[in-house]
């Protein structure tokens, strides 16, 4: 484990390995439940995408915390990206320790949105809702900084517009929508290149 932590300190996170993800998801789901396995792989890929974005712009304390999580949730140099993602969000004080901030994120409005949502969902814990808003706004900002393609930037703006109501932005859904757009972009890219040939 120590070697993995030392390697991560001088390099970006390990690359997403689709074969490892497929094997992990086959172990975690019924053999013939291909939909569950595909959803599992998608989830691992999304968690890796988010962690990579955060790691890229993380300040030293957050970077160290992510490296520790990768080490703690890796077996035979195979990271479990779901568990690593959960681990990396445990220390709430570090969640915004990135070199980029979201100028549109307003903590007061995020709290108002969470209270409004709680009226429809009484079991909603306001502190958890607010934490999700902070994490999601951070991730959306990082995606915008990394994925510069004009088409993706336009789709990110669609997400922002779609999930803003009465000046209240649902950052969780904006970030989820951005992940959907990135998944779609990745899926369509090979098909679009084939259609041009």
Image (cartoon, rainbow, N blue to C red):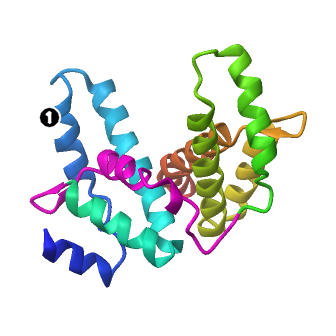
Q: Position of residue 28 (x, y in %)?
A: 19, 32
Q: Is residue 108 above or below residue 91?
A: above
Q: Is residue 194 above or below residue 39?
A: below
Residue ranking furthest to the bottom: 10
Q: Nearer the viewer, residue 35 or 190?
A: 35
Residue 29 placement, left or right of 196: left
The quarter of the picture where residue 66 lies is bottom left
Q: Residues within 10 Å of mark 1 (few under 14, many from 20)?
A: few
**x 31%, y 80%: residue:** 9
Q: Nearer the viewer, residue 90 or 26?
A: 90
Q: Is residue 9 above or below residue 62?
A: below
The quarter of the picture where residue 132 lies is top right
Q: Position of residue 27 (x, y in %)?
A: 14, 34
For residue 97: magenta? Answer: yes
**x 57%, y 70%: residue:** 98
**x 37%, y 65%: residue:** 65
Residue 43 placement, left or right of 195: left
Residue ranking furthest to the right: 166
Q: Position of residue 97 (x, y in %)?
A: 55, 68
Residue range of the region highlighted in magenta in the rendering: 74-101
Residue 129 visible in this rendered orientation of the protein: yes
Residue 35 placement, left or right of 124: left
Name the residue that disc number 1 marks.
Answer: 27
């Amino acid at each position: 484990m120590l070697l993995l932590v030392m390697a991560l300190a001088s390099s970006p996170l390990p690359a997403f390995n689709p074969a490892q993800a497929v094997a992990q998801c086959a172990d975690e789901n019924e053999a013939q439940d291909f939909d569950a396995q595909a959803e599992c792989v998608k989830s691992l890929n999304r968690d890796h995408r988010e962690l990579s974005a955060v790691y890229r712009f993380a300040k030293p304390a957050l970077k160290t915390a992510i490296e520790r999580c990768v080490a703690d949730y890796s077996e035979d140099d195979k990271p479990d990206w779901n568990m690593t993602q959960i681990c990396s969000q445990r220390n709430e004080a570090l969640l915004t320790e990135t070199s980029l901030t979201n100028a549109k994120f307003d903590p007061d409005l995020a709290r108002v949105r969470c209270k409004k949502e709680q009226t429809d969902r009484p079991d909603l814990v306001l502190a958890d809702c607010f934490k999700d808003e902070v994490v999601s706004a951070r991730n959306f900002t990082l995606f915008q900084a990394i994925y510069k393609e004009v088409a993706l930037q336009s789709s990110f703006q669609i997400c922002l517009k779609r999930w803003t109501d009465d000046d209240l932005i649902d950052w969780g859904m904006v970030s989820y929508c951005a992940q959907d757009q990135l998944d779609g972009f990745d899926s369509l890219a090979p098909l679009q290149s084939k259609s041009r040939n």
